[in-house]
Image (cartoon, helix red, strand yellow):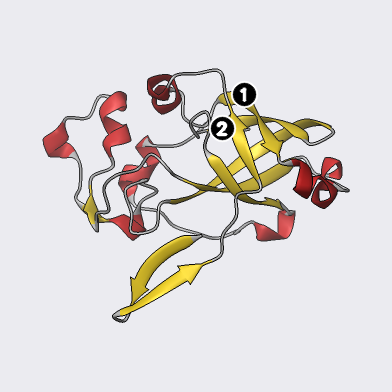
Amino acid sequence: MINGQYDGCDVEYPLTPIGVVRVNATEEEVRERSGTLKGVVEVFHEFEDGLQGIEEYTHLFLIAYLDRVQQRLLRVKPRRLLRKGFREEELPELGVFATDSPVRPNPIALTLVRLVRREGRVLHVEGLDLFDGTPVLDIKPYRSDYRANQYSVPKWVLHDSRPEI
């Protein structure tokens, strides 16, 4: 259950984790190797039937709750660029919705991973950028018609690309 306020009223959103990420890496290693890690998604027993047919897909979207995020900001700098040699003063200040920063009003992650194999309720995946123990809220299959053929991105994003999975 997620509690919050909307328009001055208390609200509850009934979100239940369906599983958890398992990755053999420290939080710092996850930050450094974001999008390249191998690991598993352990789906809880009561949701295993929901995996029927998932092994026919090569890629999956994981929707996760970033349970370790403490801050909620609306303006951020793409700090991952610091690992690419940029200096702090060179980073653009952006609205959080123009980035994939985890420090956002609702700390929800959307991660594209490659499904290596399924073993019962365990999904072996590559391309993780989530910490060990991160709750998974949902899994959705990637389909080729989700791809945008024509798109544009800001120049800074070209320095922040992830490896192909």
Q: Which residue is drawn at 52% across and 32% down?
A: 35
For label 1, the crowd category at 10 Å Cα-Cα, with few meaning under 14, some 14 to 19 and many 20 or more, is: some
**Residue at disc 1, secondary structure:** strand
Q: Name the residue under label 2.
A: 128
Q: Is residue 61 left or right of residue 87?
A: right
**Residue at disc 2, secondary structure:** strand
Does residue 70 appear in this view?
yes
For label 2, the crowd category at 10 Å Cα-Cα, with few meaning under 14, some 14 to 19 and many 20 or more, is: many
**Are the residues at dot 1 and dot 2 in contact (C-beta closer than 8 Å)?**
yes
Q: What residue type is labelled 2?
A: Leu
Q: In this view, does 89 lie to the left or right of 152?
A: left
In the rendered image of this protein, does residue 100 appear above or below residue 85? below
Q: Residue 116 appears at what percent x and percent y?
A: 76, 29
Q: Residue 11 appears at what percent x and percent y?
A: 42, 73
Q: Residue 65 appears at what percent x and percent y?
A: 49, 48
Q: Which amino acid does label 1 sit on?
A: Lys
Residue 9 quadrant:
bottom left
Q: Residue at x 34, y 57 (%)?
A: 98
Q: Residue at x 66, y 59 (%)?
A: 146
Q: Which residue is drawn at 43% across and 19% down?
A: 29
Q: Name the residue under label 1.
A: 38
Does residue 164 appear in this view?
no
Q: Residue 52 appears at what percent x and percent y?
A: 87, 48
Q: In this view, does 91 lie to the left or right of 128?
A: left
Q: Which of marks 1 and 2 is nearer the N terminus?
A: 1
Q: In which quarter of the image is the C terminus?
A: top right
Q: Which of 84 and 150 is in front in this view?
A: 84
Alpha carbon distance from label 1 to label 2: 6 Å
